[in-house]
Image (cartoon, helix red, strand yellow):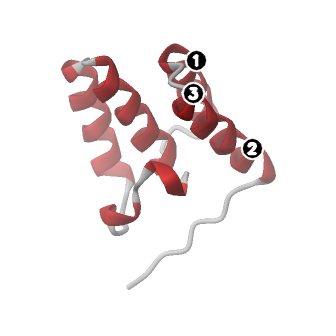
Amino acid sequence: MSYRVRFTAEARRDLDQLYDFLLERDLNAAEEAFRASLVRAPNNGWALYGLGEVYRRMGRADAVTEVTRRLDAAWAGDRDVLVLERL
């Protein structure tokens, strides 16, 4: 079984911007942007993955655990495709 995820143009722009924030290591801005994206699409696996990566880099283990729980519930596909370079 395979799944294909389609993004709106707005969601694609959000993810591009979020990746840029991470590349620049502006973790506070990245956290804010991922959280804003999740307001619009609460179960967006890519945004949950990105937010988890931000929290890992911040050393916030409690937040990583919560985001990972949400990602487990939201993501049905192969987790190996979740890498920052693909955001």
Residue where numbered disc 3 is placed: 24
| Front disc: 3 or 1 | 3
Task: Answer whether labels 2 and 3 touch (C-beta < 8 Å).
Answer: no
Position of residue 35 in the picture relative to residue 52 (left or right): right
- Sequence-wise first label, 2 or 3: 2
Task: Please give the name of the residue rendered at 26% of the width and 29% of the height, measured from the top-left corner.
Answer: 64
Q: Quadrant of residue 37?
A: top right
Spatial CA span between label 1 and label 2: 15 Å
Q: CA distance from mark 3 to mark 1?
A: 10 Å
Picture quarter containing residue 26? top right
Check the image and name the residue furthest to the top: 28
Up-down relation of residue 85 to residue 69 (above or below): below
Which secondary structure, mark 3?
loop
Relative side of 14 to 29, left or right: right
Q: Which mark is residue 29?
A: 1
The residue under the point 48% across, 75% down is 3
Q: Quadrant of the N terminus?
A: bottom left
Q: Which residue bears the numbered disc 2?
A: 13
- Residue placed at 40% from the left, 56% from the top? 82
Q: Disc count in the image?
A: 3
**Earlier sequence position, callout 1 versus callout 2:** 2
Q: Nearer the viewer, residue 15 or 44?
A: 15
Under mark 2, the amino acid is Arg
Residue 71: percent from left, percent from top: 34, 45
- The amino acid type found where label 1 is placed reads Ala
- State yes or no: discs 1 and 2 in contact (Cβ < 8 Å): no
Outermost residue toward the bottom in this view: 1
Label 2 sits on a secondary structure element that is: helix
Q: Amino acid at mark 3?
A: Glu
Badge 1, how many Cα within 10 Å: few under 14, some, many 20+?
A: some
* Secondary structure category for the residue under label 1: helix
